[in-house]
């Protein structure tokens, strides 16, 4: 079956390359026979792509799931992606020749030198098969880079047309048609980028964008690594919602333990730079709590870094597969660590809070996932049931009356999956500290509590243990508040949980479970809005943490 896929794939590449050459011939000298030939061949290419697609899925379905078959499966997945993009290139060729009929004369195109486009794009098509067969990283990167070259050519033609059309109004329609033709060439570059990245995936064994690959290379170079990327083991870490690319890299021949096993992170410069700064701040506050930075690199609006790979497993994993003794010990170590951090960074100051504002900032994402939450005010006779947006507006005014008595340095995204526990060393670690800042410790408390609540486990026995875990952590945080004479802890926690329950619904597809979190958010907000006494007297309903 694989041999059949390969043969059909070779036919597809051959036909697309030929289609591309015929398109260039047509632009130089259009004729009806050539036009018909291009249109007819396009249907054949579509069918050939469908045949390859069907055979790819059929072949993969017969492979047993094992490490042994991973390379073969990756090869077939790469073939499938390349076939889809080759078929798109053939479609773009047809779109180009169809535009010619709108020109006053085909010779109008000569002033824009489309031969340059054909030259480098044709080279890219020629490199696809050798790159795959030889697993040639250089060819794959060359193919990817053609997208940038195609973008530059499009921009050059576009600017030239803008200049010419100002004085040559007679050929306005020709200029518009030329822009469309140039745009299709630019889109061929986009498809070649997809093809190049598919070949990178086959060679490296992991999906990676060309800019991420380049960032990985540069970050390794910054560290002083002289080998090739193929000499390291790169494994993606999925599940992040941060928009950053995260992967674990290993190189057994590296001399230091720190670089032998590290995490590569790449993303928007503002995020990566902020995380770097926070990692450095945490190292000063509590050495060893967060990963050490191995190397760091910036390029334009993208940042990347290698950081130490930390041992242990996430708190979320401990909760899902609970060994009661280990989990109890992990919670104790976490609480001791937090007490130390809070004590060492505590600064007496009257600090405003913005929990309702944080909820409003994220409300669009919530309503996109659950549009039914955005309902108007309802009336039953004289009784009004306000819309959630109305409650939030009142909540904004309410929280102006509440202040934290002191600030500490908080994690900022204190979910259970951002806390690691190493049982052998009896210590915890923090990861993903991009949002760390000096703020109210109650924010970390609320995020941690809701991150336990929102774990989608509905087994009664495990859920009972999760509720006990939440209660124990709440008791710890409340005891700390009493020790520090934080008299408005319960009221602020109520506001913080309004935010955390509400914003967590955007990650929950189970409508019933999302509704449970929304109800708790609304219940707490209404409870706080009805309270008109001294905030030190507010009685927090602890059962809201249980499910």
Image (spheres, grey):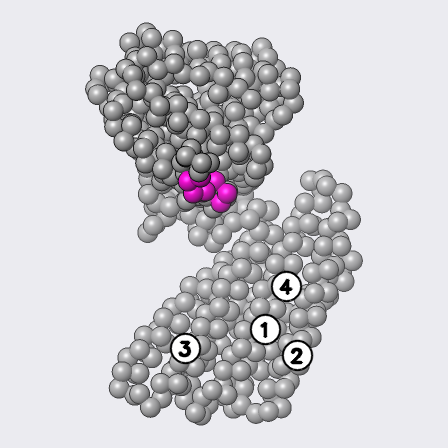
Q: Is residue 105 above or below residue 335?
A: below
The residue indicated by pointer 2 is 41
**Where does the image place residue 130, in percent across and percent down from the top left?**
61, 63
Q: CA distance from mark 4 to mark 1?
A: 11 Å
> At 57% from the left edge and 13% from the top edge, which residue is drawn?
326
CB atoms at circles 4 and 1 under 8 Å apart? no
Q: CA distance from mark 3 to mark 4?
A: 27 Å
Q: CA distance from mark 1 to mark 2?
A: 9 Å
CB atoms at circles 1 and 3 under 8 Å apart? no
183 falls in the magenta region: no
The residue indicated by pointer 3 is 179
Q: Is residue 62 left or right of residue 225?
A: right
Quarter of image, res 155: bottom left
Q: Is residue 448 left or right of residue 80?
A: left
Mark 3 Cα-neighbour bin, 10 Å: few <14, some 14–19, many ≥20: some
Residue furthest out toward the top: 483
Q: Earlier in the sequence, mark 4 or mark 2?
A: 2
The part of the chain drawn in magenta is 371-378
Residue 171 visible in the snapshot = yes
């Amino acid at each position: 079956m694989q041999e059949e896929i390969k043969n059909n794939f070779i036919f597809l590449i051959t036909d697309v390359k030929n289609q591309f050459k015929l398109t260039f011939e047509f632009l130089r000298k259009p004729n009806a026979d050539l036009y018909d030939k291009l249109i007819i061949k396009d249907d054949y290419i579509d069918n050939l792509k469908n045949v390859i697609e069907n055979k790819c899925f059929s072949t993969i379905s017969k492979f047993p799931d094992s490490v042994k078959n991973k390379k073969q499966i990756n090869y077939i997945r790469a073939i499938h992606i390349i076939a889809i993009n080759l078929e798109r290139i053939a479609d773009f060729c047809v779109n180009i020749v169809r535009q010619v009929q709108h020109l006053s004369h085909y010779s109008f195109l000569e002033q824009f030198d489309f031969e340059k486009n054909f030259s480098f794009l044709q080279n890219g098509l020629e490199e696809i098969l050798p790159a795959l067969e030889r697993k040639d990283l250089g060819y794959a990167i060359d193919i990817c880079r053609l997208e940038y070259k195609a973008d530059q050519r499009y921009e050059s033609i576009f600017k030239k047309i803008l200049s010419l059309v100002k004085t040559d109004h007679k050929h306005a329609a020709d200029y518009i048609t030329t822009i469309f033709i140039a745009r299709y060439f630019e889109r061929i570059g986009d498809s070649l980028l997809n093809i190049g990245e598919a070949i990178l995936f086959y060679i490296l064994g992991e999906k990676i964008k060309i800019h991420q690959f380049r960032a990985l290379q540069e970050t390794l170079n910054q560290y002083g690594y002289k080998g090739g990327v193929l000499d390291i083991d790169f494994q993606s870490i999925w599940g992040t919602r941060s928009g950053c690319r995260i992967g674990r890299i290993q190189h057994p021949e590296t001399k230091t333990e720190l670089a032998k096993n590290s995490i590569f992170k790449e993303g928007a410069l503002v995020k990566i730079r902020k995380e770097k700064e926070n990692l450095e701040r945490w190292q000063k506050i509590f050495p060893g709590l967060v990963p050490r930075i191995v190397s760091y690199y910036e390029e334009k609006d993208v940042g990347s870094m290698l950081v130490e790979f930390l041992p242990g497993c996430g708190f979320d994993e401990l909760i899902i597969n609970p060994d009661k003794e280990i989990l109890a010990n992990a919670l104790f170590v976490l609480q001791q660590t937090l007490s130390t951090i809070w004590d060492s960074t505590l600064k007496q100051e009257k600090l405003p809070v913005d929990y309702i504002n944080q909820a409003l900032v994220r409300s669009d994402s919530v309503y996109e996932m659950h549009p039914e939450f955005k309902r108007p005010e309802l009336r039953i006779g004289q009784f009004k049931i306000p819309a959630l947006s109305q409650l939030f507006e009142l909540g904004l005014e309410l929280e102006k009356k509440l202040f934290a008595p002191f600030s500490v340095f908080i994690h900022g995204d204190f979910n259970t999956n951002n806390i690691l526990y190493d049982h052998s060393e009896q210590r915890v670690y923090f990861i993903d500290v991009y949002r760390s800042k000096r703020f109210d410790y109650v924010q970390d408390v609320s995020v941690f509590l809701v991150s336990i609540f929102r774990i989608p486990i509905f087994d009664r026995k495990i859920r009972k243990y999760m509720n006990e875990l939440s209660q124990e952590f709440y008791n710890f945080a409340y005891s700390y508040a009493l020790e520090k004479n934080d008299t408005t802890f319960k009221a602020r926690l109520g506001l913080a949980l309004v935010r955390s329950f509400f914003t967590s619904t955007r990650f929950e597809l189970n409508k019933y479970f999302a509704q449970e979190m929304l109800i708790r958010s609304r219940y707490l907000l209404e409870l706080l809005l009805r309270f008109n006494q001294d905030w030190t007297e507010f009685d927090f309903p602890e059962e809201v943490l249980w499910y």
